[in-house]
Image: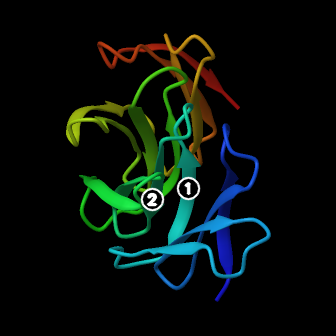
Amino acid sequence: DEVFAAACSPTDASLVISGGKDDRGFLWRIGSAQDFQELTGHGDTVCTVAFSSDGKLVACGSMDGQINVWNTATRTLQGTLEGSSGSGFEWLRWHPRGNLIIAGSEDCNVWMWNADHNAFLNTFAGHSSTVTCGDFTPDGKLICSGSDDATLRIWEPKSAQCRHVVRG
């Protein structure tokens, strides 16, 4: 089936994760056809994947509105982060220095969790259409998000307050 997402480990040049239409992610070792791990548990297309900045964890987000977090050393499921039921995730990003995850959804929101505790922290509401892209700033002190509503929004992670809006 089609592959919709891929990412390389920031700490191990031979480790790759992919996700696709078959509702699964795969953790691959480059150069070894036998060294891979199937990452199951999604009910729909895995369309976004990412490694944590230290490479110890990997996240797979899907159109079923959940993100599964896996330990790359043990290759075991660490937890599942739930979003809006019936609304898929378009993208996800890890905090540059911690285990916070943000993800943009078809429900017009950005969601944030603590992956260490599998805990929902906040939603960032203000877009009026699917949130198609986003990221933390390099220092992790702000979040930017873009949407099909033709806006770019800047958010404060702790308060979930929108600091600035640019309209396209």
Q: Position of residue 99 (x, y in %)?
A: 39, 31
Q: Residue at x 38, y 18 (%)?
A: 157
Viewer-proximal residue among 3 and 32: 32
Name which residue type carries label 2.
Gly
Image location (x, y in percent) of residue 49 = 55, 55
Residue 98 — which label? none
Sort mark 1 into few (<14), some (14-19) or many (20+) by Cα contacts within 10 Å: many
Instruction: Check whether the beta carbons of the residues at disc 2 and disc 1 lie within 8 A of each other.
Output: yes
Residue at mark 1: 49
- Residue at the bottom extreme, as displayed: 1
Query: Residue 13, how many percent across, how many down?
Result: 76, 47
Q: Amino acid at mark 1?
A: Val
Give me the residue at 67% from left, 75% from top: 3
Q: In the image shown, does 151 or 105 lie closer to the viewer?
A: 105
77 vs 120, left or right, is right
Q: Front-most of 36 and 49?
A: 36
Residue 61 - label = 2
State whether residue 167 is above or below residue 51.
above
- Residue 17: image quadrant is bottom right
Q: Which image quarter holds the C terminus?
A: top right
* Mark 2, other Cα within 10 Å: few <14 / some 14–19 / many ≥20: many
Number of numbered labels in the structure image: 2
Q: Residue at x 47, y 59 (%)?
A: 60
